[in-house]
Image (cartoon, rainbow, N blue to C red):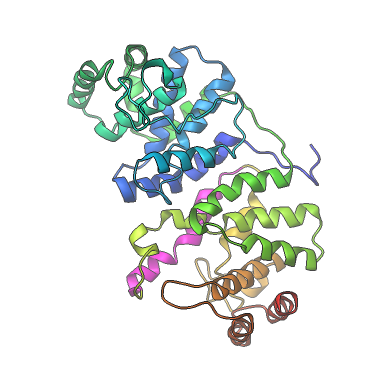
Amino acid sequence: MDKKKEIQFNLNNFLLSVSLGLELVEKDIHSTTNNHSKRVAYISLKIGQQLNLKPQELSDLCAYSLAHNVALKKKSEYNKEHLELTQELVDKLPFLCGYRDVLKYYREYFDGSGIFGLKNNDIPLFSQIISFSHILDDKFDLSGDNIENRKGIVAFLEQEEEVLFSKEIVDKFLDASSTIDFWLDMQNENDILYFIFGSLYDFTISPRFEEVLTFTSVFDSLIEGENNFLDLCSKMSDFYKFDHKDKYTFLIAASLHKIGKLAIPKKILDKKESLTDAEYEVIKSYPYYTKKILNNLMGFNDITNWACRVQESIDGTGYPYKLSGKELSLKDRLMAVLNIYYSLINKKSYRNAYSHNESIEIMRKLAITSKLDSSIVEDVDTQFS
């Protein structure tokens, strides 16, 4: 691996980390319980093992399971548009086996009554497995220890065999769930993670930084939609003559700097009126969740720090950590300046966009009070005027 051009990346490590945010979105919109995505992955892997899937297939099955709710932040209703967007997003990620339309068709039912009307074995096998796992945990909440719940599951499967699910998937699930550890594992996040990591081969790859930026930009698009924030960051990276590695790790951080907003309830993010003090405090928690989501990613230490310090101030009054100026690097300061500049020059639901000159004047006032780095503010003025 060329450390100046490449970085280690493991898709399941990445998606297990991001699943915290995706699960909070699904909980907010559809009232699922904590660790839902991980339980979907757990059940899917158990079924996959019963089907004797190859290691690469198990790895992809786990990743698809963890990403099944990736589009909910943008399209909250389960319909064709939602599923097509889900597939469009995951198509940008580095799966191993090249299977097509897994998440486009994961809301299909075996009798053909699903959204696209596929039936029987026209439905991709992975789609069938993930559909089964999602429906089961969504309906019965397998995070709890309830013997009656298990009996209800058996009765439900008898009723829905050859209707929602194939007989093969039902039988494989019943085989996999015949031991008590199956049910106990799902009550504890650490046990789920232990099983997942113990079941998967290490398919860590060494993509170029540019490729990783493509992967991470999937999650930037969920929160910001189409935007030019990365263009601003790229231009300033060139202005400061960052080398290849520094430029692209900075851009990766920029693409992830708002991923913590996945943890913020939709009703607060979409509110058009002024936020209450309590709601503003919730908004201020997003850099904390950015760090929480990214903290377990291999090789992302610097990227995580730059992404989660975007709301820190030189005078030590920023959030969430109130870091002092001497604790903030050039990249920390640059990200903070560009984040404010980008916000100002874009229209909000409660105000029109500011012009470049108006934005710079606002930022100069913040620099005078030691909120922002004044030299970077002036450099931004030079580059974008």
- Viewer-closest of 124 and 153: 124
Q: Position of residue 287 (x, y in %)?
A: 51, 61
Q: Residue at x 39, y 49 (%)?
A: 25
**In the rendered image, which quarter is residue 241 located in?**
bottom right
Overall secondary structure of the magenta stretch?
Answer: helix
Asked whether residue 223 is drawn in magenta, I would say: no
Quadrant of the snapshot with the C terminus: bottom right
Nearer the observer, 209 or 77: 77
Height in image: 366 above or below 235? below
Among the 4 quarters of the image, the one containing residue 181: top left
Q: Residue at x 67, y 66 (%)?
A: 232
Q: Residue 360: horizontal and vertical position, in percent?
A: 63, 82
Q: Is residue 376 above or below residue 127?
A: below
Looking at the image, can residue 183 be seen?
A: yes
Please name the residue shown 79% across and 68% down the image: 239
Observer able to see residue 144: no
Q: Residue at x 74, y 42 (%)?
A: 208
> Which quarter of the rendered picture does the N terminus lie within?
top right
Q: Which residues, given as a range, are shown in magenta?
A: 275-297
Residue 369: % across, % down = 59, 86
Camera-side residue of 288 and 208: 208
Q: Is residue 282 magenta?
A: yes
